[in-house]
Image (spheres, rainbow, N blue to C red):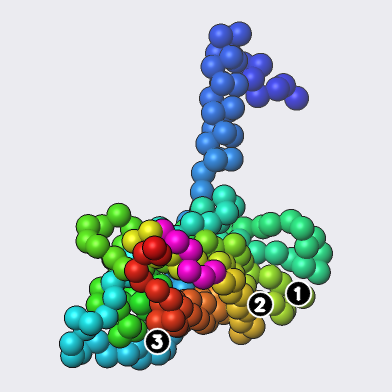
Amino acid sequence: MRHPLSEYSPAGKRMMLAGMVLLAAGCASSVPWQAPYDIMPSHPVPLASTKGTTTALPVLRLARVSAAHWLKTDAYQYHLLYQEPQRLLAYRDARWVGTPPQMIASRLQHQLAHSGQWRAVLAGQSSGTATWLLQVRLTDFVVNFSGPETGKALVAGTATLVNATDYRVVAQHSFRFTEILPGASAQGGAVAMAGASERFVAAVSGWTAQMASTGKSTPRP
């Protein structure tokens, strides 16, 4: 039986082989269609009403949420703790609608703005003078499977409240929340991640308001 390339001239063989290499490279680098998942809760908890006067309340600036390098992607990442606990994997057919810090920032901005604790919540480098600066660093945002049918979503990070006048650190606190997966699938992980994220942003929001109310907003002498 003759080789498929035997009918081609040497130049033709080279062109055919080059085409095959390019095709293989294209297949290896192409990303299959992925279902996008968000962390918005299925049944959002009503937030505090912001009606009424807020002129006496302080202004908060939420800095850009930072994160470890491995979280700066929209890949839907998970661990198989019962097989290779140190190996970080990602779904081929699922992804997040944004990077974890982007999604947490969106949820936190909304939570803070509707908490009734601030006259305004400024984002990043937006114009305006703030009394307090909130810095959040995300350290974990991953689904951990403890078994083939069981697992938990994990959201963890550190919040730092800074006096925006003299940039003095007022307080810092670490937060860690897990939520049991309702099903061992990308959909189940997304539901659990939404629950863990909701608890995370609510805790950060409440802690920030508490620390600001007990801290001093004027520069030290």
Say whether disc 1 or disc 2 marks the residue closer to the N-terminus.
1
Quarter of the image where one finds residue 18: top right
Under circle 1, the secondary element is strand
Q: Residue flagged by tag 1: what amino acid is it?
A: Ser
Q: Please state the horizontal and vertical placement of residue 55, each as a whole percent of the image.
A: 19, 81
Specify few, some or many for label 1: CA neighbours under 10 Å numbering under 14, 14-19, or 20 or more.
some
Which residue occupies the foreground of this view, 105 or 24?
A: 105
* The C terminus lies in quadrant: bottom left
3 vs 1, front mark: 3
Main SS, magenta residues: strand
Q: Residue flagged by tag 3: what amino acid is it?
A: Pro
Query: Which residues make up the magenta segment?
Result: 167-172
Q: Does the CB distance between marks 1 and 2 fall below 8 Å? A: yes
**Residue receiving disc 2:** 152
Specify few, some or many for label 2: CA neighbours under 10 Å numbering under 14, 14-19, or 20 or more.
many
Distance between the Cα atoms at labels 3 and 1? Answer: 28 Å
Distance between the Cα atoms at labels 1 and 2? Answer: 8 Å
**Residue receiving disc 3:** 44
Q: Residue furthest right?
A: 83
Which residue occupies the foreground of this view, 197 or 57?
A: 57
* The N terminus lies in quadrant: top right
Q: Please state the horizontal and vertical placement of residue 60, each as a whole percent of the image.
A: 33, 70
Say whether disc 3 or disc 1 marks the residue closer to the N-terminus.
3
Distance between the Cα atoms at labels 3 and 2? Answer: 20 Å
**Residue receiving disc 1:** 146
Q: Please state the horizontal and vertical placement of residue 106, each as a whole percent of the image.
A: 38, 68
Quarter of the image where one finds residue 131: bottom left
